[in-house]
Image (tube, rainbow, N blue to C red):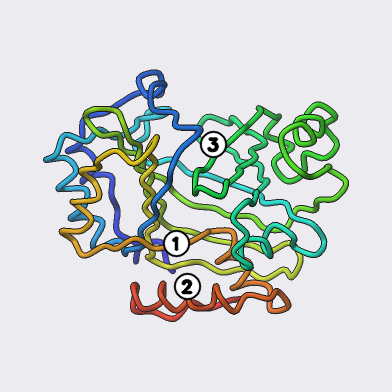
């Protein structure tokens, strides 16, 4: 999707009071319950307006209210982590490296979901040069072995995701809302690339099932919960050999939301 076709959110975000990374320490939510939503950029404009009126604050990191992210997901040769998700295994994991482009910081991250739907994330900092492949870093490999079911030798760089993120915090600082736009994917196994055009993935992250004003705002804009994994959607779109029947329904849901067909090159 051409850059000029996207909506610019810089001006709407000026209506939200800022919050710094230091102030956000109390809402890290590394052990949390996540609820995802799917919408488009036009609807997001109204959501941001209502969030400002409700007193939500926007994270300002390195002077910016919108932060570019670059992530590389790792999986086994047989796509074990992708398959576990596709097969509805309740206990599952994802392993990725992630770079916060503006700051230059990078981390190896391990996400584990338990059979009660809670997500727990562990991470350790790595040099940004190791974003494409951390497996030569002995300390990072030990960290992976200590906090996941996998050894570094079992994993391969599988897929890169690029997106822009807006992060909101509610007035009580009991939840964090991440808003991902301009999502692009590149599959290292197949060489195929794609994007989700003007789709927006919103995620409400809470420690437990506390009341959420953002959920009410999204309901007002007819934005409903959607169980969507960026990694699984990306593999479905870019790897024709992957068993992905269940996720193809999610792809159609995205296309219906944005009123466009997603293409792959």
Name the residue beneath numbered marker 1.
227
How many tags in the picture? 3
Residue drawn at x 33%, y 35% is: 175
Residue farthest left in this picture: 53
Which residue occupies the extreme top position in the image?
A: 22
Q: Are marks 1 and 2 in contact (CB under 8 Å)?
A: yes
**The quadrant where residue 109 appears:** top right
- Circle nearer the N terminus (1, 3): 3
Q: Name the residue under label 2.
A: 250
The image quadrant where one finds the C terminus is: bottom right
Residue 223 against residue 248 in the figure, above or below:
above
18 vs 91: above or below? above
Q: In this view, does 161 lie above or below 234?
A: above
* Mark 1 → mark 3, Cα distance in angstroms: 25 Å
Place of residue 123 in the rendered image (x, y in percent of width and height, measured from the top left)? 63, 32
Q: Under tag 3, what secondary structure?
A: strand
- Residue at image position (24%, 46%) is 214
Upstream in sequence: badge 3 or badge 2 = 3
Identify the mark at residue 205; answer none if there is no mark: none
Q: Position of residue 26 (x, y in %)?
A: 38, 22
Crowd around label 2: few <14 · some 14–19 · many ≥20 (10 Å): some
Check disc 1: other Cα within 10 Å, few if <14, some if 14-19, many if 20+.
few
- Above or below, 157 against 27 in this view is below
Label 2 SS: helix
Q: How far apart are marks 3 and 2 (CA)?
A: 27 Å
Mark 1 secondary-structure assignment: loop
| Neighbours of disc 3 within 10 Å: few (<14), some (14-19), many (20+) | some
Cα separation between marks 1 and 2: 8 Å
> In the rendered image, which quarter is residue 169 located in?
top left
Residue placed under numbered mark 3 in the picture = 100
Are circles 3 and 2 on residues that touch, CB within 8 Å? no
């Amino acid at each position: 999707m051409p850059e000029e076709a996207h909506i610019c959110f810089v001006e709407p975000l000026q209506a939200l009071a800022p919050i710094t990374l230091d102030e956000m320490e109390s809402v890290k939510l590394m052990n949390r319950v996540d609820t995802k939503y799917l919408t488009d950029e036009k609807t997001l404009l109204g959501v941001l307006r209502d969030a400002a009126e409700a007193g939500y604050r926007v994270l300002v990191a390195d002077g910016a209210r919108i932060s570019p992210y670059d992530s590389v997901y790792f999986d086994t040769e047989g796509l074990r982590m992708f398959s576990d998700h596709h097969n509805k295994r309740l206990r599952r994991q994802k392993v990725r490296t992630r770079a916060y482009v503006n700051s230059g910081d990078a981390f190896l991250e391990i996400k584990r979901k338990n059979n009660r739907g809670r997500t727990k994330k562990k991470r350790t900092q790595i040099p940004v040069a190791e974003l494409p492949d951390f497996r030569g870093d002995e300390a990072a490999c030990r960290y992976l072995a200590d906090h996941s079911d996998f050894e570094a030798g079992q994993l391969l760089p599988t897929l890169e995701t690029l997106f822009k993120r807006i992060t909101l915090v509610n007035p009580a600082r009991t939840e964090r809302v991440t808003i991902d736009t301009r999502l692009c994917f590149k599959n290292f196994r197949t060489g195929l690339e794609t994007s989700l055009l003007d789709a927006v993935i919103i995620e409400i992250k809470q420690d437990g099932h506390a009341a959420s004003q953002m959920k009410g705002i999204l309901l007002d804009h007819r934005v409903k919960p959607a169980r969507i994994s960026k990694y699984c959607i990306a593999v479905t779109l870019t790897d024709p050999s992957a068993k992905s029947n269940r996720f193809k329904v999610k792809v159609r849901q995205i296309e219906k939301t944005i009123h466009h067909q997603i293409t792959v090159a």
